[in-house]
Amino acid sequence: MRRPALYSRSPTRPAADEAASQPVADAAGAAPGPAPQVSDAPALAAPTRRARLIRALAHPSLLWAAIALLGAALLWQVMPWGKTAPRKLTQDDINAAVMHTLTHKVLPSQAARAAASVGPSLVRVEGMLPGRKDRKGHTEMGRGIGTGVVIIDNGTILTNLHVVQGAENITVTFADGLESPAGIVNIQPENDLAVLRAQKLPDDLQAATMRSTSDLVPGDEVVAIGFPFGIGPSVSAGVVSGLKRAFRSPEGGQQMSNLIQFDAAANPGNSGGPLVTMDGQVVGIVTAILNPTSARTFLGIGFAVPIENAAAAAGQPPF
């Protein structure tokens, strides 16, 4: 009697394998003995493609090759040849940029920039002078108004001697509006200069920058800043008209020499104010105007004391 075949739990095999597993009669036609049973343990599966790829990538030679490739990429980024060199600017590029700025933006004039540089150092100087008695016997106080410029941030101010001479008290008003009493600490009559010291100072007081007159020449542009007729601060622009000029006031005062002649408008009240170059540096202290009439108004010729003399009056070292 034929015995049924026994199958394992492994996946179905091809028909050829099934045929091979059937019992075969021996040469005598007798049924063979029972077929050997197939083991239930699953056979070792062949390595998958992913496993083979992982083993290949883990090979030391491939890892070193990857490290070398990354290092070469990093070196390319940090070295100059890894970057695009900027285009070199040409004169046409610069001209185009300047023209664009001039076309689309209105720039302040040189005189405006010079005045702005010295503006924080400008002060109004007011001296109360003994007055005359009126018909009723009352004394009227006189008042002299001039200009000064801070040259040391401890409140040291340069002005004209004739602005404060004989004053019973002196008041200075700084650019931020602060008013302070001031006293005379030094005078230089031969140059009509007085050095004042204010008692109260603004927190952000700035001293003006002074410049030697050694390279000053006629034709250099300058501005005069002050309080003409008490109005100000006022700015007027002109040029240096001459150097080493001499002047004697119509009232018969002492003759002064080595003066800077200029044509920027100046009037009573400008006395003691700074004469400033276009780079915002003080080269002189305005001291007088030439007017042979009694009007005492500007006719086109003004004089300033060179800043070297003025600085010496304040005890500043020479340039």
Image: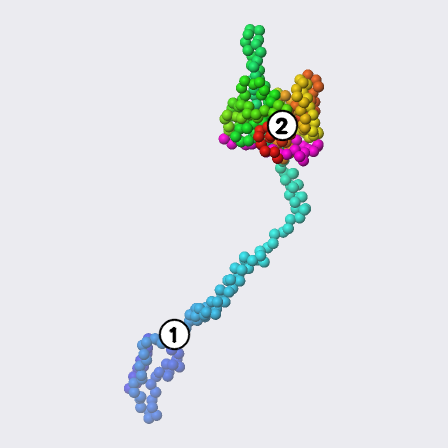
Residues rendered magenta in the picture:
203-224
- In which quadrant will I find the C terminus? top right
- Decide whether residue 160 is among the magenta residues: no
* Identity of the residue furthest to the top in this view: 136
Q: Residue at 67% of width from left, 34% of height from top?
A: 216
* Identity of the residue furthest to the bottom in this view: 28
**Is residue 230 visible in the rendered structure shown here?**
no
Residue 291: % across, % down: 69, 20
The secondary structure that dominates the magenta segment is loop
Q: Is residue 144 above or below residue 217?
A: above
Graded by Cα atoms within 10 Å as few (under 14), some (14 to 19) or many (20 or more), the crowding at tag 2 reads many
Q: Residue at 66% of width from left, 17% of height from top?
A: 251
Residue 255: % across, % down: 67, 22
> What is the C-alpha distance between the residues marked 1 and 2?
106 Å
- Which quadrant of the structure image shows residue 133? top right
Q: Which mark is residue 236?
A: none
Q: Secondary structure at mark 2?
A: strand
Instruction: From the viewer's side, name the closer residue of 146 and 50.
Output: 146
Q: Secondary structure at mark 1?
A: loop
Residue tagged 1: 45
Residue type at the position of mark 1: Ala
Mark 1 or mark 2, which has the lower sequence index?
1
Q: Which mark is residue 285?
A: 2
- In which quadrant will I find the N terminus? bottom left
